[in-house]
Amino acid sequence: MRVPFTILTGWLGAGKTTALNRLLAAPHGRRVAVLVNELGRISIDTQLITSTGGDVLELAGGCVCCKVDIKNDLWEGIADIVERARPDHVVLETTGIAEPAAILDSLVETRKVDDDAIVAKRAKEQAAARERIQPAGVICVVDAESGAGALDAREEAAAQAIAADRVLISKLDVATADAVRTTHARLDSLAPEAERAAFPADAGLALTSWLLEPRKLRAWTSRAHEHAGEHHHHGGQLVAVTFADDAPLVGERVLAVIDSLGERLVRAKGFVHLAGDDRRGFVERAGIRTSLEHRDPWGDAHRRSEIVLIGDDLDEAALRRALWACRAAK
Ligand SMILES: [Zn+2]
């Protein structure tokens, strides 16, 4: 029997990992295997996922919808996780820039097998993955506070909403009434048929049933599919920069570096080895918010900063220099 396969998508910082954690934490009794795809070379999300049972597999270093070697990792990963974890459901958390229609294309459509041995091998792996899963829906997380801006400005964000059969509205606890109105208005035009839903903090189980319920891939077979044909994805200049450093850093300075990037920075997330603090720092830019939190103490864990920054035309070398300048002796 094929395992239901759900794609969880949404723009950078929309709240995909938060939704996933709520799903995994709810007492639904189902074995949910999770594949997490991230742009950065270091996977931050898999470290943020508090898995209880099931299995989590990371696909880091590029986007599965368009980077061929990562796409192969996806096919292998699906086959592997279904064999190993025997899940009741598989969920793929896409990168924030993925086009779900392109992923579904590769999973559902039969491609001609070429003479070329590598292409033939890929086609075989793809077929093996396809035999194990049954696409069960595309859920797009849309941030009510700043998601409308992304839907306007970014083709990929719009494509995600268009491909979705369900839209999960996030951040309603911080969004103004105007922002909520604008978000719904954008969705009215982009994805009028996709069901919209939100789940308060105490409705984790309701969120889970909704996320895991198999639905027809309505939009994908119509508009989104056409959209995928004009796959101008990554035609932009979004760059993922990964910074890793063992030295302690001054938290306020790290925040200042992130703030200095202004709107060019679309997303940042990662752990910070804070100078003079035993707690693990977590720095984040999501939507219009930048924050530095203090989490649990490091304990025996190796103290190390690992930050992924995603934005337009980021200068990796300059960013590294600026972050090195945040170092302190202890
Ligand atoms: Zn992609």
Image (tube, rainbow, N blue to C red):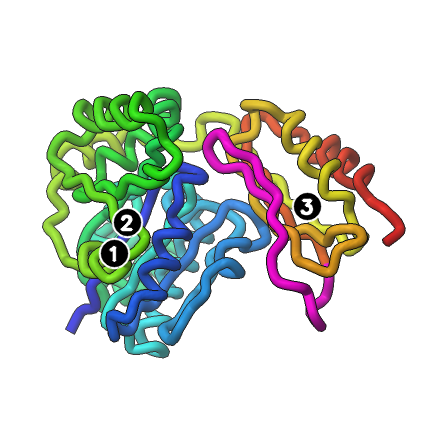
* Residue found at x 22% / y 27%: 184
**Residue named by callout 3:** 243
* Residue found at x 79% / y 51%: 275
The answer to whether the residue labelled 2 contacts the one labelled 1, judged by CB atoms less than 8 Å apart, is: yes
Q: In which quarter of the image is the N terminus?
A: bottom left
Residue 22 rendering spot, x and y as whole percentages: 35, 58
Q: Which amino acid does label 3 sit on?
A: Phe
Q: State the separation of the CA atoms marked 2 and 3.
A: 35 Å
**Residue named by callout 2:** 200
Assign a secondary structure to mark 1. loop
The answer to whether the residue labelled 1 contacts the one labelled 3, judged by CB atoms less than 8 Å apart, is: no
Residue 43 figure quarter: bottom right
Residue 265 figure quarter: top right
- Badge 3: how crowded within 10 Å, few (<14), some, or many (20+)? some
User: 7 and 299: which one is in front?
Assistant: 299
Assign a secondary structure to mark 2. loop
